[in-house]
Image: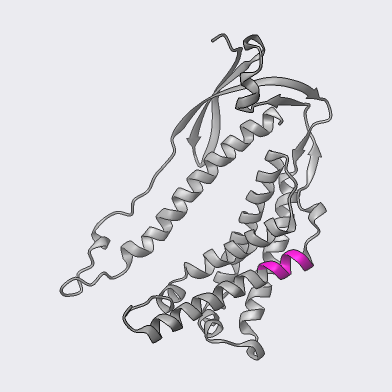
C-alpha cells in the first residue's frame, strides 16, 4: 500500500464522513419543516434548529514499515476523471428522464415521477451521479483496487434513488397515512418497488452499455511513491526499530481538509 494513498484515503474518508453528516442534516431539514399536526396545526419540530455536526480537527498517528520506493509513481488526474464522471452523469440523467416520459412503458410510479421532469431536477441529478462516481473512482484509486462495472452500476442506481426519494412529491406519494388500510399499504409498497426497479434498471443499462471501465480512472505521472506496510498483524511481527510513525494534524477549514502539521519518526515504544 502506498503511503500517499493511505493518508489520502484517511482524508478522503473524513470528507466522506462530513458529507454524510451534511446529507443527514439535509434529510432532517424536510422533517423539521414538515407540518406536524398537534392539536390545531401546530408545527412542533419547526420551532427547533436542524441538528448538524462538523468535524473540526483530527490527529493521526500512523504506524508503518517502508517496503520499497517506487520511482514511477502516478497520481489521479482529477480533471479528466471528473470529466468522465460528468459525461456519465449527463447520460444517466437523460436516460432516466426519457424512460420516465415513455408513454408506452408508463406506470403509476412513472406518473408520479413525471413531476420531476424539470431542468432543475435534471441538473441536480447529473451533479449527484457525477459526484458519486468521482468519489467511487477516487476511493478505488486510493485503495489500489480494481474498479468493476457492478461498482459503477450500484453507484449510479443508489444516487438516482437518493435524488428521487428525497423529492417532496415522491415522499408524499410514498407516505402511508393509514397502516391499518392493507390496500393503501400494498399500493405504496408497489409504487416504491417500481421506482427502485426504475433506478436499478437505469444503473444497469448505463454501466453495462455506456461505460469503458478501462478509461474511468484517469492517471497522470506523479512523484515517486513510498510503498508501505500498514497491516496491524504484520507490524506485530516486525522489529520495533523498523517501525516508523507518521503524525498528522488535519483541520477542516473553508470546506477543505488541510494538513496543519506532519512529523515522522522511528517508533521507540
Asked if the magenta segment contains residue 28, the reply would be no
Q: Quadrant of residue 46?
A: bottom left
Q: Which quarter of the figure is the C terminus placed in?
A: top right
Pick out the residue farthest to the right. 72
Residue 50 appears at what percent x and percent y? 33, 54
At horizontal 67% and vertical 73% (from top left) the residue drawn is 94
Pick out the residue farthest to the bottom. 104
Q: Which residues are magenta?
A: 203-209
The relative height of residue 223 versus residue 95 in the rendered view (above or below) is above
Left or right of residue 7, residue 145 in this image: right
Q: Nearer the viewer, residue 126 or 161?
A: 161
Q: Quadrant of residue 262?
A: top right
* Magenta part, dominant SS: helix
The relative height of residue 241 versus residue 194 in the rendered view (above or below) is above
Q: Nearer the viewer, residue 86 or 109?
A: 109
Asked if the magenta segment contains residue 208, the reply would be yes
The relative height of residue 92 versus residue 190 in the rendered view (above or below) is above
At horizontal 60% and vertical 12% (from top left) the residue drawn is 265
Residue 268 appears at what percent x and percent y? 57, 8
At horizontal 29% and vertical 54% (from top left) the residue drawn is 49
Left or right of residue 208, residue 108 in this image: left
Q: Nearer the viewer, residue 74 or 153?
A: 153
Left or right of residue 66, residue 127 in this image: left
At horizontal 78% and vertical 68% (from top left) the residue drawn is 209
Residue 207 appears at what percent x and percent y? 73, 64
Residue 7 appears at what percent x and percent y? 62, 31
Amino acid at each position: 500500500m502506498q503511503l500517499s494513498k493511505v493518508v489520502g484515503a484517511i482524508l478522503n474518508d473524513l470528507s466522506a464522513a462530513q458529507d454524510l453528516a451534511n446529507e443527514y442534516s439535509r434529510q432532517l431539514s424536510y422533517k423539521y419543516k414538515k407540518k406536524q399536526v398537534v392539536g390545531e396545526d401546530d408545527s412542533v419540530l419547526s420551532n427547533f434548529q436542524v441538528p448538524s455536526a462538523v468535524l473540526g480537527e483530527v490527529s493521526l498517528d500512523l504506524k508503518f514499515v517502508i517496503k520499497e520506493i517506487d520511482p514511477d509513481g502516478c497520481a489521479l488526474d482529477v480533471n479528466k476523471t471528473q470529466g468522465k464522471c460528468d459525461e456519465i452523469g449527463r447520460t444517466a440523467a437523460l436516460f432516466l428522464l426519457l424512460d420516465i416520459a415513455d408513454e408506452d412503458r408508463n406506470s403509476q410510479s412513472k406518473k408520479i415521477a413525471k413531476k420531476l421532469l424539470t431542468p432543475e431536477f435534471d441538473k441536480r441529478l447529473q451533479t449527484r451521479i457525477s459526484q458519486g462516481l468521482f468519489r467511487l473512482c477516487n476511493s478505488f484509486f486510493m485503495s489500489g483496487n480494481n474498479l468493476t462495472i457492478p461498482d459503477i452500476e450500484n453507484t449510479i442506481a443508489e444516487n438516482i434513488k437518493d435524488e428521487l426519494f428525497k423529492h417532496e412529491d415522491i415522499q408524499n406519494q410514498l407516505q402511508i397515512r393509514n397502516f391499518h388500510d392493507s390496500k393503501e399499504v400494498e399500493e405504496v409498497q408497489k409504487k416504491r418497488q417500481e421506482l427502485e426497479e426504475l433506478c436499478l434498471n437505469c444503473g444497469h443499462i448505463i454501466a453495462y452499455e455506456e461505460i469503458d471501465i478501462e478509461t474511468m480512472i484517469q492517471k497522470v505521472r506523479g512523484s515517486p511513491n513510498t510503498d508501505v506496510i500498514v497491516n496491524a498483524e504484520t507490524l506485530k511481527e516486525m522489529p520495533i526499530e523498523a517501525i516508523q510513525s507518521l503524525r498528522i494534524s488535519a483541520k477542516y477549514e473553508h470546506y477543505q481538509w488541510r494538513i496543519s502539521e506532519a512529523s515522522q519518526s522511528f517508533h521507540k515504544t
